[in-house]
Image: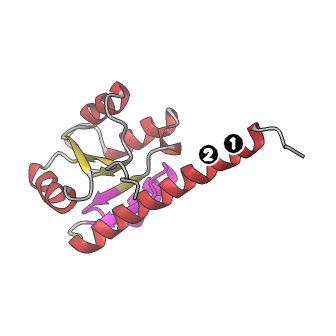
Amino acid sequence: MKQLKKKTALIVDDAEINRVILTELLQDDLNLIEAESIDGAIDIIQSGKTPIDIILLDLIFPEKSGFDLLEFLRGNHYLDEIPVIVMSSEGSDDFIERAFLLGAIDYVRKPFTERILVRRVLTTLLLYQNKKELIRKIEERYETPSSR
């Protein structure tokens, strides 16, 4: 049976306790990278050293907000490849709508139910993996001349 490569999640949260909790929840299923600031997250993404498969993003930071990262990702077409799940204690309709308008794939309110969050992350990864595979197959089909 083919061994699948472990996917990598970027956790972007300025609160260390939140990063610790997420690491505990996801370390068995994913490789994890942490950023405690928006600029740190952008540096990790732009470096390209490790391909990021999903981003778990808090919105509230002392300086820049999670919205700034969503705008960066959108402006550089990263959202086409990297799904973002926003996690925030802010649950106003305006915040949620803005996150979706900027390209977030999901919005989870803190505090979250741990096992539900894990399922949402893994399901999102599976959906994106299936999407990429389908696109690859379509591209292969139309790039290869028909043998009729």
Residue in the picture at 31% in, 50% down: 6
- Is 123 situated above or below 51? below
Residue at 90% over, 46% down? 148
Q: Is residue 88 magenta?
A: yes
Q: Which of the 4 quarters of the picture holds residue 122?
A: bottom left
| Quarter where residue 26 is shown | bottom left
In this image, 22 relative to 66: left or right?
A: left
Q: For the magenta stretch, what is the residue range?
A: 86-109
Residue 54 inside the magenta-drawn segment: no
Question: Compared to 90, does 49 lie above or below?
Answer: above
Tell me what residue is drawn at x 69 percent, y 48 percent. 138
Q: Where is mark 1, residue-wise?
A: 140
Q: Nearer the viewer, residue 109 or 148?
A: 148
Specify whether residue 21 is in view: yes
Mark 2: few/some/many CA within 10 Å (<14, 14-19, 20+) = few
- Asked whether 128 or 91 is in front, the reply is 128
The answer, for residue 94, to whether it is visible in the render is no
Point out residue 84 in the picture as x, y percentages from the top left corner. 40, 51
Check the image and name the residue furthest to the front.
1
Q: Position of residue 140 (x, y in %)?
A: 69, 42
Kind of residue at disc 2? Arg
Report the Cα–Cα distance between label 1 and label 2: 6 Å
Q: Is residue 101 left or right of residue 92?
A: right
Which amino acid type is marked by label 1? Glu
Residue 136's disc number: 2
Q: Which residue is more in the foreground, 114 or 128?
A: 128
